[in-house]
Amino acid sequence: MTCDFLVIGAGIAGLSFAIRAAAHGSVIVLTKGNALDSNTAWAQGGIASVLQPGFCDDGDSVELHVADTLDAGAGLCREDVVRAIIGEGAATIDDLTGYGVDFDKHDDHFALGKEGGHSKRRILHARDTTGREIAESMVEVARRTPNLTLLEDHFTIDLITTGKLGSTTEDRVLGAYVLEKASGEVRIFRSDRVLLATGGCGKVYLYTTNPDSATGDGVAMAWRAGASVANMEFIQFHPTCFYNPAATGAEARSFLVSEAVRGEGGILINAKGEDFTRKADPRGSLAPRDIVARAIDREIKKTGAPCVYLDVTHKPPGFMRERFPFIHEKLRSFGLDCEKQPIPVVPAAHYQCGGVVTDVNGKTTIRGLYAIGEVACTGLHGANRLASNSLLEGNVIARRALADILSHYGVAKHTDDAPEIPDWHHGDVTAPDELVVIYHNWDELRRLMWDYVSIVRTDNRLRRAGTRLRNLKKEVREFYWGHRVTADILELRNLVAVASLVVDCAIRRRESRGLHHTLDYPAPDDRFLRDTVLRRF
């Protein structure tokens, strides 16, 4: 299949781009599962933006939002990128309301929340299911947009580039090989303008707030294609994932209790009822996520307790039911009334701050290939993402990426000098019959990443992880080439690739900064005040 724009991923980043691009040419959006299986749809808190004077919190400004972002990023944010993205925040809110997103309001003004690291109330939200509201609205718009085709259950295997086909000219993207899950066949999707919007890699860890789809596919594909990748050591752990060891099912084990709950007065306490986070930062429960997650990790290890608690029992009766109805009802379904009992919580892998290296327009190091959203490393997040900046980034960079593509490449037909793309050849005509190998390696990978490459690291743990990952990579490679490809094989292959990138980046950063904390180098070191950039040659 041929199109002017090929978009891989259907969260806020991919759909924002696709809806706009459809006015300029044919667009195909590929998603490996259901269109609502995205980190966007799972987002609870909201989207951070400074609105026009008179509609924002008293004294708030773009400068304050920039300052909060730079502070959270621990010295590694690119200030020009931060200013560009935050400066376009109000425009991106107009986009979303135009798509039908219904943000909460008080009278004629948006109701604004506050989250960790923010000095003002600037989080727009739709109760506590903001991401779902955004995702459903945008999917609905996409389905009725002319020139836009949304294909679910289409798993992108690899990017096709001139370099991978042996061309000695400038490396540029030509399209992708895609597994059609229903038929099991691999098809070629041809396009000179490809946009990665595949989200993050939370499923590389044993405990995560992410949906099952978050397997790092875009980073792995870009890496194999030869694009630069940076800062993968900075994996953000959300401080408050619901702890319920008796629960069964992925949703029960990965249920996120939004940071907005702390923004509305929730306090983290230990089993004795003490507000232990004040020892780590005067902002306490509303310090940036890296600080709070480490404080919880330290408290759990010091006391031997299995969890800490998020206490909202001091709020007025009915508050949680009104402001956070989804969280309130979900906790009740697990047998906990959060208005009467503190919520047991632990940190869990949540957000990838590094990714495919891009400029402020989403342009990667491969011609014609763009990356936006969590899959990309623009320089906005630095060493630690400020809460609710991610949805903002995805929508802003989508606008900028399309403008950049139209400026540099237009929508001219595909170039005639492209090498012929060979058909896909399966490694074997038989389907894999040893699924136990895949599931065993999947579990081992996620457990070793949790044990060795989690919130607190050491050189020894990282070396152990690297050694085992090399063995896993070999086993997965043999399985990949020896069997017919399936979604399970592809996800495992991508997880191993991304886990290796996380470990390789972490080994290179011999300091503690933001989300990367190592006991061997517990302090920041200005010699490492730079991005950790990797490229496969």
Image (cartoon, rainbow, N blue to C red):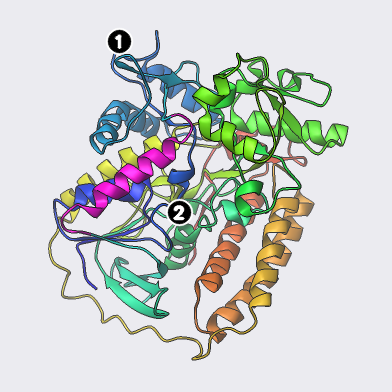
Does the magenta run of residues contain 398?
Answer: no
Question: Badge 1: few (under 14), some or many (20 or more) residues near its Cα, within 10 Å?
Answer: few
Q: Is residue 167 visible?
A: no
**Picture coordinates of residue 504, whole percent (x, y):** 62, 56
Q: Dividing the picture into quarters, in which one does residue 9 lie?
A: bottom left
The residue drawn where x is 57% and y is 62% is: 495
x and y percent of residue 396 in the render? Answer: 31, 38
User: Residue drawn 55% across and 25% down?
Assistant: 321
Give x and y (percent) for residue 439.
66, 70
- Per the image, the residue denoted by label 2 is 37
- Amino acid type at image mark 1: Gly
Q: Residues within 10 Å of mark 2 (few under 14, many from 20)?
A: many
Numbered label tally: 2
Front-lying residue, 286 or 228: 286
Q: Magenta residues?
A: 127-148
Q: In screen coordinates, is 434 left or right of 352? A: right
Q: Earlier in the sequence, mark 2 or mark 1?
A: 2
Question: Mark 2 belongs to which amino acid?
Answer: Asp
Taking the view exactly as shown, the residue that stands out farthest to the top is 58
Q: Is residue 133 magenta?
A: yes
In the image, residue 335 sits, relative to residue 485, either above or below, namely above
Residue at 63% in and 21% down: 266
| Foreground pick, 21 / 367 | 21
On the image, the x and y values in percent for residue 252 come to 64, 47
- Residue marked by disc 1: 54
Foreground: disc 2 or disc 1: 2
